[in-house]
Image (cartoon, rainbow, N blue to C red):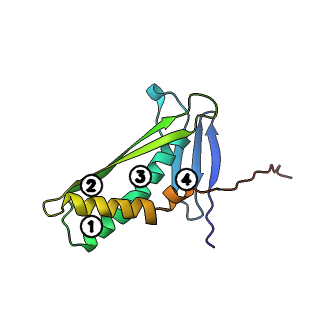
Amino acid sequence: MSKRSVTVRMKADLEYEAVNPQGNKVDIDMYDAAEKQAQSPMDLLLSALAGCGSVDAVLMMKKKRRTIVDFYVEADGERNDGIPAYYKSIHLNFVLVSPDATEEEFKKVVALSVEKYCSVASSLKSEITHSSEIKRPL
């Protein structure tokens, strides 16, 4: 079993920084849209899902020796109105610009990527257990 970890540290009241053991950093903020400078945790969830689905889709298209002029994923999530405001549904729109790829093969690649290989998508549909504890420095 593989284990991952990050440390999230407060920088200011509504600003945080997530750092993995390798030192890679992601800024997070909870500002309103007008003041927003980083993604919120819920934005990051959409980004993680779209990013995860992208990696294998692109690799599979390249393995098929298809030319990729442009590729992106638009991720939209519908959130619960109450608290917690969790995602009730998420839609991913995969866009590929390629002179030699067919829509049918790209559709199959995306389905494989999201439904079989994407760890984030699998995590969203699984029964994840989580726990928490508090620690105070001595």
Pick the front one: 112 or 6: 112
SS assignment at label 2: strand
Q: Nearer the viewer, mark 1 or mark 4?
A: 4
SS assignment at label 3: helix
Which image quarter: residue 13? top right
What residue is rendered at 50% in x and 27% in y? 32
Q: Earlier in the sequence, mark 4 or mark 2?
A: 2
Real-space Cα separation, disc 1 to disc 4, in angstroms: 25 Å
Which image quarter: residue 63? bottom left
The amino acid type of the residue labelled 1 equals: Met
The label on residue 124 is 4
Q: Are marks 2 and 3 in contact (CB under 8 Å)?
A: no
What residue is rendered at 52% in x and 45% in y? 27
Pick the front one: 118 or 111: 111
What residue is rendered at 64% in x and 42% in y? 10
Real-space Cα separation, disc 3 to disc 1, in angstroms: 16 Å
The label on residue 61 is 1
Q: Earlier in the sequence, mark 2 or mark 1?
A: 1
Q: Which residue is mark 2?
A: 71
Q: Are marks 4 and 2 in contact (CB under 8 Å)?
A: no
Q: Are marks 2 and 1 in contact (CB under 8 Å)?
A: yes
Real-space Cα separation, disc 2 to disc 3, in angstroms: 12 Å
